[in-house]
């Protein structure tokens, strides 16, 4: 890992796709609830653990069991699982004992808990682990790509990263190798490009495996909103899709752009910059997460709250 740590996008407490639910996880006296974008409590504090809404449902924990609530706060899937994960592609991963399977939004078990590991559905397929090998199933549980890889990731832009023989490459949705495993490490495809590491340096390739940006960086992360986070030495900045540096490496840590701003770390504190690389919210937080739906979760000490695009708290840090 390069000294200039590159962070992938993490939408904490906000959901996905700009947070269509408009609800955000908050805590008071150790119990989780949800607020709206104005900071008004919409779902009372009652959960031992609460997570972001995706596809209109959110994982919650009561005691040591996990279930789901709807956007009104009503429990629609009774807490009953050892672990549970966000809905994606109409399915959610659930865990019973030491095996993983999938349910739909009506709590119908669509694929029994049988896998050693399981990933989110994307483009109709999900990675599963059987006998220590990764393959892919469709939404009915049918094995579409036989478990054969040492590791495999979620599909994105008709490609999934897989590891074979200690090297990373990409397959297409039929399981055929689209890019021969040859890289030390890779990131998922976004905006037509994937970051790949070879010979100790990161560059980018297109979906056919053709070099798009020559390996030259100490670290790199997927493109978002036309900007690719990169690291050179101990500092990070951003490039465009031609490989040109558009925000000079100067930050201790950089994240992806989301809603036209990116979280960066400078002087040991987190703030947010615009696409010109100038701070729009000064570094002042000990933790910071991506903006979703106009709010971002930030941390001060062990407390977390939400700020708006002006850096003003709509929910003061709490736990």
Image (tube, helix red, strand yellow):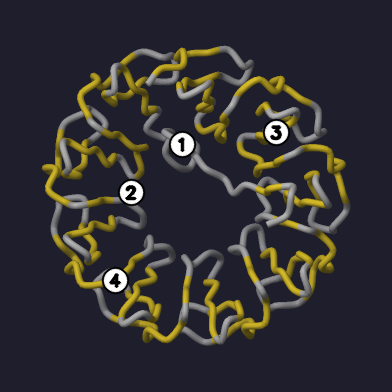
Dots 1, 3 in contact, CB < 8 A? no
- Answer above or below: position of 218 versus 237: below
Q: Earlier in the sequence, mark 3 or mark 2?
A: 2
- Residue at image mark 3: 265
Discs 2, 1 touching: Cβ within 8 Å: no
Looking at the picture, does residue 147 appear above or below residue 216?
Answer: below
Counting residues from the N terminus, which is met first, the one under dot 1 or under dot 3?
A: 1
Q: Name the residue nearer the viewer: 286 or 183.
A: 286
Please tell me whether mark 2 or mark 4 is closer to you in this view.
4
Q: Residues within 10 Å of mark 1 (few under 14, many from 20)?
A: some
Residue 45: percent from left, percent from top: 24, 20
Whole-Å distance between the Cαs marked 3 and 4? Answer: 37 Å
User: How far across and how far down the image is residue 151, in percent?
Assistant: 47, 75
Disc 4 marks which residue? Answer: 116
- Name the mark nearer the viewer: 1 or 4: 4
Q: Which mark identifies residue 12? A: 1
CB contact under 8 Å: marks 2 and 4: no
Gap in Å between the C-alphas at discs 1 and 3?
17 Å
Badge 3: residue crowd in 10 Å (few <14, some 14–19, many ≥20):
many
Residue at figure coordinates x 31%, y 82% from the top left: 131
Q: Please state, as top left, top right, bottom left or bottom right, where the C terminus lies in the image.
A: top left
- Which residue lies under the disc numbered 2? 86
In the image shown, does 238 or 96 lie closer to the viewer?
96
């Amino acid at each position: 890992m390069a000294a200039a740590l590159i962070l992938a996008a993490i939408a904490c407490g906000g959901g996905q796709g700009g947070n269509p639910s408009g609800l955000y996880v908050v805590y008071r006296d150790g119990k989780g609830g949800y607020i709206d974008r104005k900071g008004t409590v919409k779902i009372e504090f009652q959960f031992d653990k609460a997570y972001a809404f995706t596809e209109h449902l959110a994982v919650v924990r009561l005691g040591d069991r996990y279930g789901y609530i709807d956007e009104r706060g009503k429990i629609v899937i009774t807490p009953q699982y050892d672990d549970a994960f966000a809905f994606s592609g109409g399915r959610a991963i659930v865990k019973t004992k030491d095996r993983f399977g999938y349910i739909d939004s009506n709590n119908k078990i669509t694929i029994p808990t049988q896998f050693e590991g399981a990933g989110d559905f994307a483009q109709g397929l999900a990675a599963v682990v059987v006998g220590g090998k990764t393959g892919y199933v469709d939404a009915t549980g049918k094995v579409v790509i036989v478990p054969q890889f040492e590791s495999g990731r979620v599909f994105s832009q008709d490609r999934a990263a897989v590891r074979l023989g200690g090297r990373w490459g990409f397959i297409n949705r039929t399981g055929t190798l689209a890019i021969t495993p040859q890289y030390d490490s890779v990131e998922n495809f976004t905006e037509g490009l994937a970051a790949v590491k070879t010979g100790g340096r990161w560059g980018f390739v297109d979906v056919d495996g053709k070099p798009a940006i020559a390996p030259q960086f100490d670290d790199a992360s997927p493109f978002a909103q036309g900007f690719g986070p990169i690291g050179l030495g101990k500092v990070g900045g951003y490039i465009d899709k031609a490989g040109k540096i558009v925000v000079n490496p100067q930050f201790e840590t950089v994240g992806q752009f989301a809603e036209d701003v990116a979280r960066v770390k400078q002087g040991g504190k987190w703030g947010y910059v615009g696409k010109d690389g100038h701070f729009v919210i000064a570094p002042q937080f000990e933790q910071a997460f991506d903006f979703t739906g106009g709010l971002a979760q930030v941390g001060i000490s062990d407390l977390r709250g939400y700020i708006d695009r002006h850096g003003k708290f709509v929910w003061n840090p709490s736990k």
